[in-house]
Image (cartoon, grey):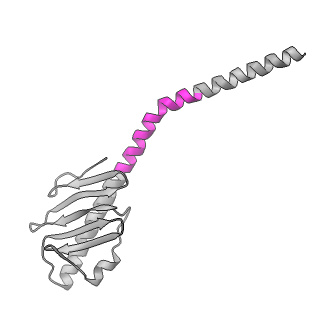
Amino acid sequence: MKEENENNKTVRTVEYAMVIIVLLIVLIIILPSLNKIIYNMSKDSAVTSTKNTIDTVKTIYTNMNLKNEVALPFKAVFSKDGYTFYENGKKVNYELTVNIKIEGKKPKSGSITITEDGTVTVKDLTYGNIKCNQIKDKELICEK
């Protein structure tokens, strides 16, 4: 009777070990795909947030230009503490800039510039570990 219980315990232990080994193998196979999915989701989120931030900066420029003459180039510089606007290289201190509302994530660093010819340049707009860049309305590129 005692020998049977010991054999059952041994068999159960081996079965549990095999289940754990199979689960680990499945995890090892799935993990790279899961990482790629998470990276692509982060990248898509950064692209969407960058486009929303560009639209917000354009709207703020337009609103500021309706109230006062705002010179180009118009630049929004983002940091972890917030944002600062510059027109023609000089800091802008209009009340309108206090209430910026960006749909999606706010960038931790980087800048968006509206140039004299109206094109938009994005430089190192950072969301987590993803940086987005765009030169004069060309394709928006976001990557690690």
Residue visible at 19% across and 82% down in the picture: 66
Q: Quadrant of residue 132?
A: bottom left
Query: Relative to 8, does residue 40 appear above or below in the rendering?
Result: below
Asked whether residue 72 is drawn in magenta, I would say: no
- Quadrant showing the N terminus: top right
On screen, residue 7 versus residue 89, left or right, reads right
Q: Quadrant of residue 88?
A: bottom left
Count up the numbered dots: 0
Taking the spot 78% from the left edge, 22% from the top edge, the residue there is 9
Q: Residue at x 37, y 45 (%)?
A: 40
State whether residue 117 is above or below residue 45.
below
Q: Say which of 21 and 51 sits in front.
A: 21
Up-down relation of residue 31 to residue 135 (above or below): above
**Picture quadrant where residue 13 is located:** top right
Compared to residue 58, the image places residue 14 above or below, namely above
Q: Which percent across, then down, holds residue 124?
A: 25, 56
Q: Which residues are magenta?
A: 23-43
Give the residue drawn at x 64%, y 26%.
19
- x, y (%) of residue 98? 33, 79
Using the image as rendered, state which of residue 21 and residue 55 is in the foreground: 21
Residue 42 on the magenta span: yes
Residue projecting furthest to the right: 1
Which residue is most to the left?
117
Q: Residue 85 location, x and y as percent? A: 24, 73
Instruction: Assign the magenta stretch its main secondary structure.
Output: helix
